[in-house]
Amino acid sequence: MISARFLPLLAGTLLATTAPALASAPAAPVATPAPAAKAAGIQRIDPTFWWVGMKNPKLQLLVHGPGIASSAATLKAYEGVTLDGVQKLESPNYLLLNLTISPAAKPGKLQLEFKGDKKQTYSYELRQRTTPGNQQKVQGLTQQDFIYFLMPDRFSNGDPKNDYIKGMRAPKVARDSMYARHGGDLKGIENHFDYLKSLGATAIWMTPVTENDMPKASYHGYALTDYYNTDRRYGTLEEYKQFVDRAHQNGLKVVHDVVLNHMGSKNYLFLDQPAKDWFNQWPKFTRSNYNSSALNDPYGSELDRSLYNRGWFDTTMPDVNQSNPLVATYLIQNFLWWVEYTGLDAYRIDTYPYSDPKFLMQWGQALNDEFPNLFKFGEAWVGSTAQQAFFARNIFQPVDGFKSNLESVFDFQSQGAIHDALRGDNGNMNRLYEALQGDWMYEDATRNVTFLDNHDMSRFYSVIGEDFAKYKMGVAWLLTTRGIPQLYYGTEVLMKNFSNPDGLVREDFPGGFAGDQKNYFTAAGRTGQAGEAFTYLSTLANYRKTHPVVATGKLMQFIPQDGVYTYFRYNDQGQAVMVMLNGSKDEKTVDGARFAERTNGFSSGTEITTGATLSSLASFKIPARTAWVVELKK
């Protein structure tokens, strides 16, 4: 399914999808690469530096500079490091250097020499790895985590000095425009670590912090223009590393948002293409068909598969040709680099299914080999549980050689179910039951990331008609069902709107910017229902944090009856929590005898959010549109 995320970028560009000819080789390029820069010397080498002690001893360096391909490259003798070969590409402005870094190599500076019309020397740094054995780095995610998802540009401006960055294509802040930068940054997030902890969050997921130097709507970050740099309007590369360290010191994990499938059209690799086959090229602009069903359809056509994986996501987002082994290596090294450099805990992968399937397996395996604790969860916005499970580790046999090694996916099926359950006067509570019934397809469905909404869809509070009782039901479900819950920023204070356009659901967090009339970061500023919402959600989230039975306990659900859905979280230590959701507009009487296999041995219960006591488990009168989260007592 396509997100409306990038529609603002399409103004003045070709919107129609052009039917491609069936072609096994790339056709003419969509965009003409810009001429090589006139400046002398090597402009950059990717990766920008590397480490000794990596499990994979191979390193591929991409050297970029005007006419560099005419130079003879050599490596000055360095113990434990050999230059295995040099490879020219289609463009005269690139060279590939293939190195082997043996376990005997020590940190230091490699001296690379390039002899052409003139001699150039480049000092390339090898660093000592810090990740292995460091318990505060690459911690991964578990069911016990609670992810807070935010857009850095729209959360809080902590450093006004980076609001204007000279030389960037969209340098200025304009808070009155939903498509412009608003000034939020890493420092602003760091300033509110205490707020996130008081809410009960244990992990922060931010939309991409990598450089997005695009002329329009660059605030969202999904059209990266430099694989090896942060966007300076958020903070420097070193400041991001410090941000991760400080988050860890505050008991908060960091999720790094990445895009494998495409890049921004202002990326230097597209403006000066190493070779035409680094991108999926078409005779005319060709958009993806956005339908992943073609990938595992036993009757599917090669045309549909090609359109899905090789068609462009958007006009300003060149589709990367990951079937090219040189491109695959470039990307894999980049994502290894970010983990080792920063110590981040997890990757969220944007548009995961759109990438080349064989590349996804290579990418995932390389990360698993170097960082076994790293958690990876992908956006697979598809139409069924089976299709969603296809992109996670599952019980299926490989299809066309593809067997996903991704630990987790976003659970769009359960997200759609909670919306269906709470829409209208009498929602369909059966959808919640059915959304979990298919969990048998996964290797471990408890790793799925559950959520109510995100930056690509209408906000949950608006979808349910701004009904506060329903809001509490949704929050109760999110924080007690199986999986790793994710909350979109502002949901805790009832931020609302419909995604028409997306900018309306990406508004600034009240209190994060100078001159804001409201400040929801403080208890005093959260007046009325915004305060009630925060209190309700934080009560449940912090209970979840201190009572593992809710996060990691087994789950047993009962088929909904008369509009009431009941399930239990329990463990072998004799602890149990009962969750009862009445989606009806009427009070319901529920016979407790039906739940005897889970309530035997218990005599009463305490509702967590209110402290109310249920003196008997024989029968329940649950009010209309009410969620009960009941700790059972013996």
Image (cartoon, helix red, strand yellow):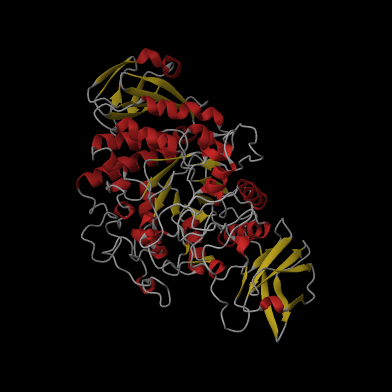
- In the picture, measured across the screen, residue 294 lies left or right of residue 117, that is left
Q: Position of residue 208 (x, y in %)?
A: 46, 58
**Is 109 rendered above or below residue 528?**
below
- Indicate whether 511 appears above or below 121: above
Q: Nearer the viewer, residue 348 or 380?
A: 380
Please give the name of the residue rendered at 52% of the width and 25% of the height, measured from the top-left corner: 572
Quadrant position of residue 269:
bottom right
Residue 320's quadrant in the figure? Answer: bottom right
Viewer can see residue 570: no
The quadrant in which the N terminus is found is top left
Residue placed farthest to the top in the image?
A: 593
Where is residue 472 drawn, in percent x and y? Answer: 29, 36
The answer to whether residue 275 shows anywhere in this view is yes
* Residue in the foreground of this view, choosing between 14 and 224: 14
Q: Position of residue 531 (x, y in %)?
A: 24, 46
Residue at 26% over, 25% down: 584
Q: Considering depth in this image, is 200 or 54 the residue closer to the camera?
A: 54
> Quarter holding the C terminus?
top left
Vertical position of residue 345 compared to residue 538: above or below: below
Q: Residue 188's spot in the image, x, y percent?
A: 37, 63
